[in-house]
Amino acid sequence: MQINRRALLGSAAASAAALPFRRGRAQGKLAVKIGVLTDMSGTYKDLSGQVSVAAARQAVEDFGVAGKNMAVDILSADHQNKPDVAAAIASQWFDRDGVDVILDGTNSGCGLAIAGVAKAKNKIHLNAGAASSDLTGSACNANTVHWVYDTYELAKSTGGSLVKAGGNSWYFLTADYAFGKALQRDTTKFVEGAGGKVLGSSAYPFPGTSDFSSFLLQAQSSGAKVLGLANAGADTVNSIKQAKEFGIESQLAALLLFISDVHALGLQTAQGIAVTSSFYWDANDRTRAWSRRFEPKAPGVRATMTQAGVYSSALHFLKTAEAMGGSVHQSGAATVARMREIPVDDDCFGKSEIRADNRCIHPSYLWTVKKPSESQYPWDYYKLVSSLPADQAFRPIAEGGCSLVKA
């Protein structure tokens, strides 16, 4: 069924919690409104989507809003992986619906669009789902925080480790939009910086491509030792499945792989693939405790790092709103500045820091997918290979070109 923008915006408003609009103070309470703008129906729905909305609700519950002098509403909508749709919904939410902060973003094109709207209207975007490192580089602004992963971190962790292991010739299969281009660009820097070579690349139309056979055959004919998949979600799953079917012998480098993708592939197919993820549900006692609390809201699945990032960013925003009181509504940039001052600590990522370029930094972990014989219980998929401390995992602040950073 065709969905036009008017119908989409109507559905976005209808997706709000069935509570009257409130602003500032309602019945003596500080009222805030959170929007989760994500991919509900497309390539990235499993790594974000409805479970991201559930993660935001978990943050409200864990914050203990019921016992505080606050009221929180949550809206959600599907941006359909279209930047113009994302911008239109963001504008409506900020202008008409009184939304204070938009979470997730998922798609880099959409994330950059939402960030632009947040800047123009002096609101807030806490991006947990988009990966382009430009969000804290050339496109940074005072109203947007990049919360979880980015293309620099992914390139350094996964790409850098494979070059060191002997994968010194690469071919890229790249989603042809902001995310894929940034991921190929950043990985290329690490490959070439380590003495490797990029033998070629194939950019495929996004969204809408499901048959990767012609692109995979080009990669196979290049003779590259590593096939770098600069894509995510269902595209990564389909790329890996089809590469296995073609008998491609190159090392598969899934530069952004989620636990939902591993689950879809199955361990028999996914075993041995390197995964960079700053969150894994079974990493430690805190992540396991959080996952047990979250399971009733998302039965049968385990949260991805995007969904965990929605939780983390929502929780920190609520802590900041409580500290600021009614002034939280006055300026998005001022609220983000206060968020940088308040320590970030939660069960998903532990202690984190928001830098002056609005990059939230935390340790990064390289995992490998277990063999079927190594998995002992449901969703027991990863084993740790190495870790990078927060100050080493992300691009040095002086190298990003962010205008917020003073020389």
Image (cartoon, rainbow, N blue to C red):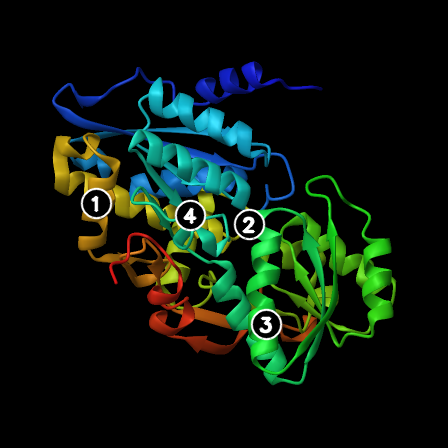
Q: Residue at position x 66%, y 70% from top? A: 273
What is the tally of numbered marks visible in this picture?
A: 4
Mark 2 lies on a secondary structure that is: loop
Q: CA distance from mark 1 to mark 3?
A: 36 Å
Q: Residue at position x 52%, y 38% from top? A: 110
Q: Is residue 113 left or right of residue 251?
A: left
Q: Residue furthest front?
A: 407
Q: Residue at position x 35%, y 55% from top? A: 402
Mark 2 lies on residue: 301
Q: Earlier in the sequence, mark 4 or mark 1?
A: 4
> Which mark, residue 139?
4
Answer above or below: position of 68 versus 401.
above
Q: Earlier in the sequence, mark 2 or mark 3?
A: 3
Type of residue at label 4?
A: Ala
Q: CA distance from mark 1 to mark 2?
A: 27 Å
Q: CA distance from mark 2 to mark 3?
A: 28 Å
Q: CA distance from mark 4 to mark 1?
A: 27 Å
